[in-house]
Amino acid sequence: MGHEDFYELTAAYALDALDKQDELSYVEHLRSCPQCREDLGAIQDTAGLLAYGAAAEAPPPALRERILDQARSERTNVIPIRRRWALPAAASVAAVAAMAAIGLGIWASSLRSDLSGEREARTGLEQVLSVISDPGSERVSPSVGSGTLVVSPTGAAALILSNLAPAPSGKIYEAWIAEDPAPKPAGLFQATGDRTHVALTRPVPKGATVMVTLEPAGGTTEPSAEPLFAAKAA
Amino acid sequence: MTVLALTGPGRATETMRLRRDHAHLSDEALVALVARSSEAALGELYDRYGPVAYGLALRVVRDPAFAEDVVQEAFLAIWRSAPRFVPERGKASTWIMTFVHRRAVDLVRREERRRGEPLERAHQASGSTEEVAWMKFERERVQEALAQLPDQQREAIELAYYGGFTQAQLAERLGQPLGTIKSRVFNGLGRLRELLAEGTGDEDRWDTKTSTS
């Protein structure tokens, strides 16, 4: 897509109305296009005003305290967001999203062919999207390999790997989070063309290094090969 | 008439007293304080925007419990993301509503079935106080601007923003080609921007000429 094509996505992005594929390409384009960032800033204020078009309503009084309590408890820790509505999903939605995920070349951590596979693929896709579109996310260049590590303020993380070769037969890529005392597995995935998107299955603490190794199919519990990618979270 | 009843009379006095410290600060200054882990600043932002956020969440997700979840997640995301807020990129209020809207839309897309349900239930919630004046003013301003859009553009914008529909879903629901929907959304929001900027001296940078219709 050329710049003009992305420009036409600006309004729909500001309204959160882009389909996943378009959103993913738009967000990636935004990183490299100051003009589109400026256009988006201009129209986002308009979209934001639409919030006032819905009638304001007093939230239940207890909500204020709940938010402040939770904020207080998170002050020193990175805690994954609790989302009670995040997981259950209608099967048809999951199926459509899984197809979209395959089309995008996004695979969740799991290539296991169990029943939760579709749901995980969908969750992974959403995680990648939400991490890379979060204005608060940090993007880190690797010290080994090529691509980007993106870490959201919650610690949810995604890898965008460039030109990763397909894993040889009987092998699979595995992501790791290097922490004391031992690296923790953070998902299995296959290479998917020019860009491989990976949703890490566990949050990345500040300062931790994320690595990728090539492992025997099925994965391992600790890395057995030299990292092909390594990046240290800010 | 929409109503706001944040506090009872006794509670209101206490709240006013606690709020006085931050009441004079701009939204952007409050976000800067939130970035330094000020709970009081987060509380003040919540007091300013909680009702708008909750009203928006209710409109989109149509369920009070889910709307609460949305508002809670959004304000916690604001708490976590405040250090990365860039004032040059846009207003703090826009930034806050972006979190709320995004979470509401994510939720409604997971809970497809809610979408067909009527809105009424969401708007019967609370007590008896007048909607505060500035919110009423903004609501009327936005609704008037929406009313001036051509019908098809207004329909596309409202279904996208308040209904949480993607453009492809809109195309299917309205039985129109995707390109037509994209044009309505693009031109509609551009026109809305002009309408809302009128009288504010806001420079218009939105160029609708490049759109396909």
Image (cartoon, coloured by chain):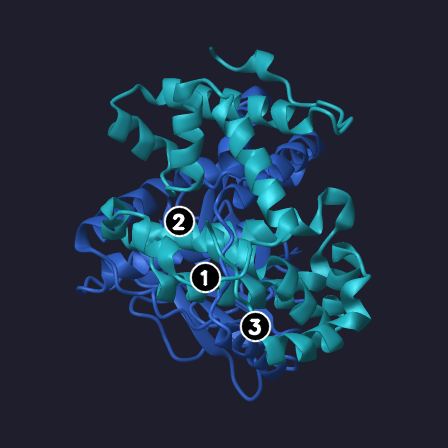
Q: What residue lies at 55% left-to-right and 71% top-to-bottom?
A: A204
Q: Colour of chain B?
A: cyan
Measured from the top left, where is residue B87 in percent x and y? 76, 49
Left or right side of A153 for A25: left
Tell me the element at label 2.
helix
The mark nearer the N terminus, 3 or 1, is 3
> Residue A224 occupies which quadrant of the picture?
bottom left
In this view of the protein, which residue sits in the foreground, A102 or B40? B40
Chain designation of label 2? B
CA gap, disc 2 and disc 3: 25 Å
CA gap, disc 1 and disc 2: 10 Å
* Image position of A185 with respect to B98: above or below: below
Tag 2: residue type? Val
In this view of the protein, which residue sits in the foreground, A176 or B130? B130
Q: Is residue A15 visible?
A: yes
The mark nearer the N terminus, 2 or 3, is 3
In this view of the protein, which residue sits in the foreground, A190 or A44? A44
Which residue is most to the bottom? A181
- The answer to whether marks 1 and 2 mark residues whose Cβ atoms lie closer than 8 Å is yes
Residue under numbered circle 3: B7
Q: Colour of chain A?
A: blue
> Residue A90 occupies which quadrant of the picture?
bottom left
Residue under numbered circle 2: B60
In this view of the protein, which residue sits in the foreground, B8 or B145? B8
Tag 1: residue type? Val
Residue under numbered circle 1: B70
Q: Nearer the viewer, mark 3 or mark 1?
A: 3
Q: Is residue A131 visible?
A: no
CA gap, disc 3 and disc 1: 21 Å
